[in-house]
Image (tube, grey):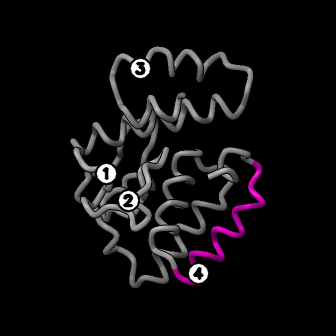
Amino acid sequence: AAESLGVIGLERSVPILKRSLDSDPAEEVRGTCELALRRMEEKASRGQVSEAPSGVPSPFLSVDPALPASDVSSIAQLRYRKNGKDSIPSCISLLQFADNASVLSYFRKVLLDENESLYKRCAALFALRDHGGKEAVNAIIASLGAASPLLRHE
């Protein structure tokens, strides 16, 4: 239910999601509430109408609990997000990476980092899924050993 509330994105859902995030005994429920709240924040901060950050839908036509980090500016925002606020402007792009392999390497690093937020890891997962290819598949396979049951589910 929390995932659906995040996708629908109504502001009136925020209090119940926050309450469940703070008090539900199940880790999976708390994680789902965290994803839903962050998804709503990301979408609102971008003024997004489309599901896809870049405006181009996922080749899988899915609606994910975290927006894929495939948008040029969203990765940089995820990378530099501190204390709930973006520490860099949204115009920063992935052009800082020399090539496609560097971008995939960065996504893999985020996906497999147990200290990263679940939202960042899911965003990297969905970006890798949307990108495809051997390196992306290998990173996704490696994530099946993650401690988070919710990440393994995704």
Reading the image, the residue beneath label 2 is 76
Q: Judge whether 99 appears above or below 130 on screen.
A: below
Front residue of this view, candidates 43 and 61: 61
Give the Cα distance between marks 4 and 1: 29 Å
Q: Which residues are magenta?
A: 133-147
Identified by mark 2, the residue type is Ala
Identified by mark 3, the residue type is Ser
Q: Earlier in the sequence, mark 2 or mark 3?
A: 3
For residue 142, which quarter of the picture?
bottom right
Whole-percent x and y of residue 32? 58, 35
Reading the image, the residue beneath label 4 is 135
Mark closer to the observer (3, 4) = 3
Circle 2/circle 1 CB separation < 8 Å: yes
Q: Earlier in the sequence, mark 3 or mark 4?
A: 3
For residue 95, which quarter of the picture?
bottom left
Give the Cα distance between marks 2 and 1: 8 Å
Reading the image, the residue beneath label 1 is 88
Residue at (49, 55) in percent of width and height: 123
Whole-percent x and y of residue 143? 69, 62
Left-right relation of 129 to 12: right
Reading the image, the residue beneath label 3 is 13
Q: Earlier in the sequence, mark 1 or mark 3?
A: 3
Whole-percent x and y of residue 80? 42, 52
For residue 39, which quarter of the picture?
top left
Mark closer to the observer (2, 1) = 2
